Image (cartoon, rainbow, N blue to C red):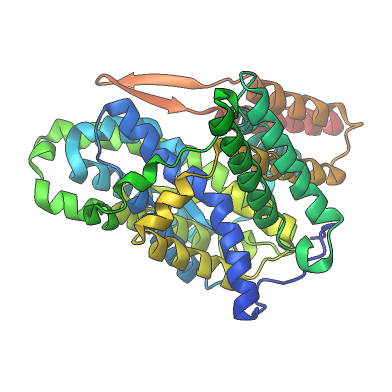
Amino acid sequence: MTNGIKLVYDVYDKLPFKKNIIFALQQFLAVIAATILVPVLVNSATSTEYLNQASALVGAGMGTIVYLLFTRFKSPVFLGSSFAFIPALIGAVSFGYFGIIMGAIMAGLVYVLLAAIIWKCGTDWVDKYMPPIIIGPTVALIGFSLAGSAIGNLGGNTSYVTIFIGIATFMVVALASNRGPKSIRLYPFIIGIMFGYILAALLTIVGNACNIEELIIMDYSAFDDIGNFDKWIPDLTFLGAIDQGTSLMSSAASWVTVAVLFIPIAFVVFAEHIADHKNLSSIINHDLIKEPGLKNTLLGDGVGSMVGAFFGGCPNTTYGESIGCVALSRNASVSTILLTAIICIVVAFIYPFVAFLTTIPTCVVGGISIALYGYIAVSGLRMFKEVDLNDSKNLYVVAAIFITGIGGLSLQFDFDGQAIVIGTIACALIIGIITNLLLSWKAKEDDDF
């Protein structure tokens, strides 16, 4: 397995602590926005406060440590709150804290079951059903599908000021990564976020002084509760379950409903799990599907997701933002991922720091996201070098994945009033696999003839 990226630090390299802490903070800043956004979206949709941002950080940190243990510290990726499970979490809120935890456990057990099947049957089927012609466009599609989120964070088309700040932040990241001195080139996200934050703060000062509302970007209202020490203790999900009990999950129907909410999504996320690890494998020049093995990455992801939900309510998943950060910083050291997980847990109990993180303008996050999501897309396109696009079969496979994916094809089924959604990435992947198998079978039949 070859790749154009020349890593500065490989998976097993031990970094000096001062340098490692900067790399870990960079990873932390790359993944935090998405990690804490999931509880915000679920709470907003349900008008409840079952999920908590600080608790999500604890869950992500604990889940990542579990993942690293199961993969024997050979796979450098961070696990954060999964967006795929948002519909399931919204439905599970009706069954309280216990319902949320049990849903995550059910989803995690699907991964455990799949790991057991792979342990018995091996991973050759992965190469057969998910060759580069499938994985390449799927990974690229993951990046493309996140593009709307990045532009939305910039402010869409509604604010020229926030768009300017976001684009300027992206440009600084690109310059730091490509034209900066060696000491700067390894930390492009830290530099970009610092620049964007300072620029937004200066414009806010001018906006307040001149009463120009468009320039007031910063929002420091999160610091209003800094004296409320109840805010310093995360509302851990398992404590809520102990306090609330299991009364909302007392009927068989409630168990079936939660199972139907979570289990189908676990099968969908399984496909993204493989795509993420194929992508990461190409970056670190080591096949993670073979070593530590898909069964171990699945166990780490599944059990890590259970543990993450136990503490933070949100099932976890491997983060493309983390993979993008590994590639752009050229640091694949697993010690950095471990330190990032520890930082997540510690920061969750330091409310002033959590409050500060919430003041980072979304337009700055959008600028960083252009680089992160763009790199995910480019990583998938890089896999095309192993594909012969002069072969019409391959053209149809790529067309099937890109057009159904970019077009937003998804499937929704209703069960007992709850929506079960097969997302865009999963639909595109499934259609791509079927197209590839169909055309490969036809080609083989023609060759035999």
Q: Quadrant of the C terminus?
A: top right
Q: Position of residue 295 (x, y in %)?
A: 51, 60
Determine if residue 434 is in view.
no
Q: Nearer the viewer, residue 83 or 428?
A: 83
Rendering quarter of residue 254:
top left
On screen, residue 80 above or below 346: above
Determine if residue 54 is in view.
yes
Rendering quarter of residue 373:
top right
| Residue beneath the point at 58% across and 65% down | 24
Q: Is residue 291 left or right of residue 86?
A: right
Q: Position of residue 60 (x, y in %)?
A: 42, 55
Q: Nearer the viewer, residue 49 or 253?
A: 49
Q: Position of residue 436 (x, y in %)?
A: 71, 32
On screen, residue 26 above or below 368: below
Q: Residue furthest front?
A: 209
| Residue beneath the point at 76% across and 47% down | 172
Q: Quadrant of the N terminus?
A: bottom right
Count up the numbered dots. 0
| Residue beneath the point at 70% across and 21% down | 403
On screen, residue 288 above or below 406: below
Q: Residue furthest right?
A: 390
| Residue beneath the point at 75% across and 33% down | 440
Q: Position of residue 127 (x, y in %)?
A: 68, 50
Q: Is residue 12 left or right of residue 229?
A: right
